[in-house]
Image: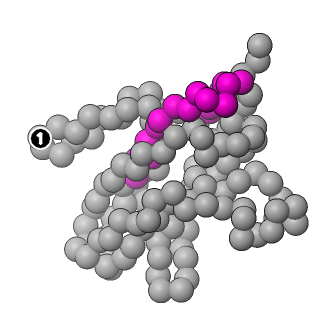
Amino acid sequence: MLALLLCESWLKDEDGKVTLHGVFDRIIKPRSAKTHKPFFVYYKIVVEIPCKVSLRVNYPQRPAEFGWHNRFKAFHSHDSFSEPGPVQSLWPLTTVIFQQPGKYAIELIQEDGPQLLSLASTVVVVDQEVE
């Protein structure tokens, strides 16, 4: 894993250089349920063998409360890589996925057959807007 970051926007140059704008690790959730902001998850990895990479968000609830299978949600089907070497990608998300305040882990997963290998994770703290 070379990078796993959250940002508000990005630009990609003709030479493939990606510039991230508004990198963050905290979200202030508005009181209005109708206001949802888009954001992006950027990652860069070195592929060694052909693989699929997916993203999931681990919710802050305890497994006993909601059942382990409801603890995370995949938000992008996957990126497939067949050639070795460094690769980078951006996935769009929105703050609608954060239903309550708490610490959420955004995790990059390599799908290796039936097994999932965690490549990296980052924590985003979600707070409620104060009136």
Residue 39 in magenta stretch? yes
Q: Residue at x 60, y 41 (%)?
A: 96
Q: Position of residue 120 (x, y in %)?
A: 53, 59
Front residue of this view, candidates 30 and 127: 30
Amino acid type, label 1: Glu
Q: Position of residue 68 (x, y in %)?
A: 76, 69
Magenta-drawn segment: 26-43
Q: Quadrant of the N terminus?
A: bottom left
Q: Secondary structure at mark 1?
A: loop
x 76%, y 51%: residue: 60
Residue 131 visible here:
yes
- Left or right for 131, reference 47: right
Can residue 38 be found in the magenta stretch? yes
**Mark 1, residue position:** 14
Displayed quadrant of residue 15? top left
Frontmost residue, 88 versus 94: 94
- Please, which residue is most extreme toward the front here? 34
